[in-house]
Image (cartoon, coloured by chain):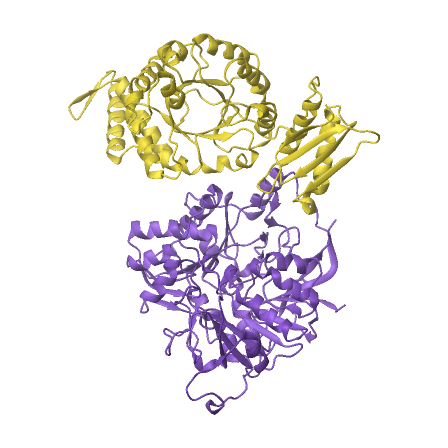
Chain colours: A purple, B yellow
Amino acid sequence: MTALIENAAGRRVPAEVNGRPATPYQGVAGFRPQGRKAAPPVRSCAEFPADGDKRAPSLVEALRRAGLRDGMTLGSHHHFRDGDRLMVQVFAAAAELGVRGLVWQPSATFSCHEPLLAYVESGVIHHIEGSLNGPLGRYASRGQMPGLGVLRSHGGRYRAIQDGDVRVDIAIIAAPAADAFGNCSGVLGPAACGPLGFALADAQYAEHVIAVTDTLVPFPCVPWHIPGNLVDQVVVADQVGDPARIVSGTTQLTRSPDRLLIAELAARFVRDAGLLRPGCSFQAGAGGTSLAFTAYLAEMMRAGNITARFIRGGSTRILVELLEAGLADYLLDGQAFDLDGVRSLRDHPDRHLATSPFTSYNYHGKGNFASLLDFTVLGATEVDLDFNANVVTHSDGWLLHGIGGWQDALFAGCTILTVPSFRDRVPVIRDRVTTLCGPGELIDVVVTERGIAINPRRPDLIEALRGSRLPVRGLAEIKAEVDAICGGPPQAPRLGAKTVAAVTWVDGTVLDAVWQVAEE
Amino acid sequence: MTSAMAGQRGPETRSDCWVEVRPAGGQPTLHVESRVAALYGDSIRTVVGETLRRLGADDLSIAVEDAGALPYVIMARVEAAVKRLRPELSAEALPEQTIHRSPTPRHRLRRSRLYLPGNTPKFFVNAGLHGPDAVILDLEDSVAPDEKDAARLLVRNALRAVDFYGAEVLVRVNAGPAGLEDVRALAAHGVHAFVLPKVETADEVRAAAQVVDALSPAHLIPILESARGVFNALAIASASERVAALAIGLEDYTADVGAARTPEGRESLWARSQVVNAARAAGIQPLASVYADVDDLDGMRRFAAEARAFGFDGVACLHPRQVGAAHHGFQPTPDEVERARRIVAALDEALALGRGVAAVDGKMVDAPVAERARRVLRLAEAAS
């Protein structure tokens, strides 16, 4: 078992991750990776057909031509979300080729990837380095996955590839539409999903790039979100994605009164703190509470005729309506969550722009968009009295979520977490988070249904809210109320002695370890 | 009976638990499965064991399937299961009374009253956060006939353990003799008012008042849901000092008179008018019924505004989202508020000069006019 060392956040973390030495977390901006970026091998156009037809007859043949062998790393994007039909086909093809010990390096995973656990069991996949959601997380939490899960943010994944922490041997790019040259578009075809930014690092840095599509169009496939000049081979497959599970047809607002209450409080906070002003910028995701927050905010923007300079998606109908009503100058979009988002990206190419983890989140960018935002609204599974937060495990220790862009988005001007103070007797406000994913110095406000807590590190926000009718309270006070409701503070979950995953910070240092859950 | 069960289980269940008790063959066993076992497994076992001891039933074996139920819920479910097995048992396992409610004023603001199904604990704990003037823990229509016993225990425990924050806490009991039993069982546990359904005579109100008298200062709010009840409105409204408001239930009323319900409500015009007039004549509040389409918040706003214009002081809500819309409907316009301020000021000034009347905008202002103006100001204050 690998040695553990204590990092700057007081967390015991592994000194070595999957055979590579790891640097323990040194503070929010304590570590600066040095040296030069990793680079893909030099290629020449002379190696490729002059007529631009890079098609391979099948996935198996494409993987064979790419030189797939034991122990290689395969990268993939998650723009198809729970509708991904491709990666199960890819690992079936790898199994057919008799390859073993692969590392899968997805930008995120979903429940649809549960069948891949069979390939972990059979040894085709050695381990998964990427978000471990739902069934994959449960599998890892039980200590069943060989190797350590490595949890990185979207920006952190880009950085890891640039730093050479991760070498993607073969990138698999699921493309809603592509031409034979390899230009990939995210807004055409039955599996249209919006931008393809999560595939960008793989396309730029992988040793070999395979685009797979079910919608082949004649050259040029435009708008190309991934240029074919980065693509080695093109495969046409029957179905790469299940449209119904890629985007929702229309975005439905939550009916949960408690989520609506939290969202409304968050929107009123933004207004009362003076953050909602002409020319402002913000990001809010598509989770139930975030979406409702955006809906309340949109109402306030309409009522006050306040125009935002730019809003960062994932885009939804609500954001598209703001754009089309002239209440947002620009939408900058890493992904589209509903059909209106996809349509808008296609129909408003001048004002609705596809972004990527490189432009928005990358630690090795020369600046990034996320830190330009005036405010951002995020969720969490837990937050502690020092405003540290967790997004990957629940209070009972189970690993159930990836980091996504969450860590990267913490760098906004005002970072607001919207969380219930407890969920069905599961506490959310803790003395100490089960797993540290976001340092408290970056989290400014916690909005719960029982009150709004402002980080004491932000006296400006506390001052701005003086005289507001909003229920501003201390986190400790809210926690005490919830503990009383739940019948006292919870007992400590019994965790095993084995680490099952490492949580990295955006700079690549190890922020915390995820521990095996000891089942009764 | 070899075993008895109580509570809810299944993948959809939240904040509740399922309990089965049976006579132990030998050493009694305590088996707990819980979604929050890692965090509260020990606590659940302690609460279950303690509840059995206090009921004098710790000779029973018990199995619990828990989906995040709070301790007062677990206690109520255990007690329900035990009493289904042993109906003769009189001991109670009361959760500690953590909430101490002072009596509410008879003419308290009651713009919104939020119904909470009495056997569904997941809605209880956050209900007060949505800011209703009152919550109604319902033992009547929202509880299945064979769950009445369990709901009564659950509501009793909730009254003692759940903070409804600023809301007035109402319990709608069952109609008839069962309702009197409900009142008897709950009056001492912190109820602000009992809502009495399907009342048709003043005697029914007096019977309930008599039960309450010995136990608590709770108010009574009769609901009139039949032609006979509406005809007796004034007698019912005046039956007891405890009656604080008179409500109308239109679903049953329209069925009773053989009318079809329409959105405009022409079929209930007389009944609604009768309730408003009877309540006012008795010096209490008339309360309108529910707006059933919980997704149509604009509709709720209109419904509440029309109720206010008709003379009602409040409406009932079926979903927390309706609360804000209801309050919006009861919000006076800025013009009304401005005029009310001038009326109150003019009359105060006149009274200071020893006169009982004043004039505002050329119209006479006396005490009843000023009282209505004060009501407008109270609504405006509550809305801000």
- B233 versus A308 height, above or below: above
- B311 versus A515 height, above or below: above
Residue A28, visible in the rendered structure: no
At x 21%, y 20%, the residue is: B358
Q: Give the camera-side residue of B240 and A226.
A: A226
At x 37%, y 68%, the residue is: A353
Split into 4 quadrants, where in the image is the N terminus of chain B?
top right
- A53 versus B158 height, above or below: below
Q: Residue furthest left?
A: B362
Residue A208, visible in the rendered structure: yes
Drawn side of residue A146 relative to residue A357, left or right: right
Q: Give the camera-side residue of A165 and A469.
A: A165
Q: Give the camera-side residue of B303 and A297.
A: B303
At which x and y percent is residue B231? 35, 11
At which x and y percent is residue A476? 58, 46
At which x and y percent is residue A328? 32, 60
At x 64%, y 36%, the residue is: B17
Q: Residue furthest right?
A: B26
Split into 4 quadrants, where in the image is the C terminus of chain B?
top left
* Count of residue discs: 0
